[in-house]
Amino acid sequence: QVFRCGNHRLVAVDTLAGFDRNTFPDMLRRAWESVPAETTLHMFQSGWIDDKEDNWLADLRRLGGTPKNFGPNILVCVFQRATPEETQQSKSKP
């Protein structure tokens, strides 16, 4: 679901127990599809402490995210994607 919040959109995911590392890439893809004009997504995770945090942070980085912890149970991860113009420019470079 997508909710408007001022100039921002909140993409809510159906998860109560935390993000599943196996399904998160597909969840991220669906989030991008729900906001096709956006170039930045912020993922917020809070309320639990992950016992495999190093693996989770590595996965987020591999998917293009920049995770940052704010204490033991708050994580913000920014995902960026190229604009259509940047994508076109990179395709035209030799």
Image (cartoon, rainbow, N blue to C red):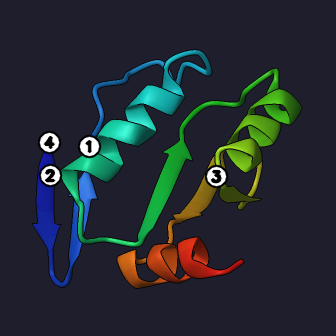
- The image quadrant of residue 9 is bottom left
Q: In the depicted view, which residue is nearer to us: 15 or 24? A: 24
Which amino acid type is shown beneath numbered disc 1? Ala
Q: In the drawing, what numbered circle is on residue 12?
A: 1
Q: Amino acid at mark 3?
A: Leu
Type of amino acid under label 2: Val
Q: Nearer the viewer, residue 5 or 61?
A: 61
For mark 4, give the secondary structure. Answer: loop
Q: Residue 81: x percent and y percent?
A: 50, 66
Q: Which residue is mark 2?
A: 2
* Sequence-wise first label, 1 or 3: 1
Give me the disc on residue 39.
none
Secondary structure at badge 1 equals: loop
Q: Earlier in the sequence, mark 1 or mark 4?
A: 4
Q: CA distance from mark 2 to mark 3?
A: 21 Å
Callouts 2 and 4 close, C-beta under 8 Å: yes
Q: Crowding near pointer 3: few (<14 within 10 Å), some, many (20+)? A: some
Considering the numbered disc 3 on the image, is that residue within a helix, a strand or a loop? strand
Q: Which residue was labeled with disc 4?
A: 1
Q: CA distance from mark 2 to mark 4?
A: 4 Å
Q: Which residue is situated farthest in the right direction here? A: 54
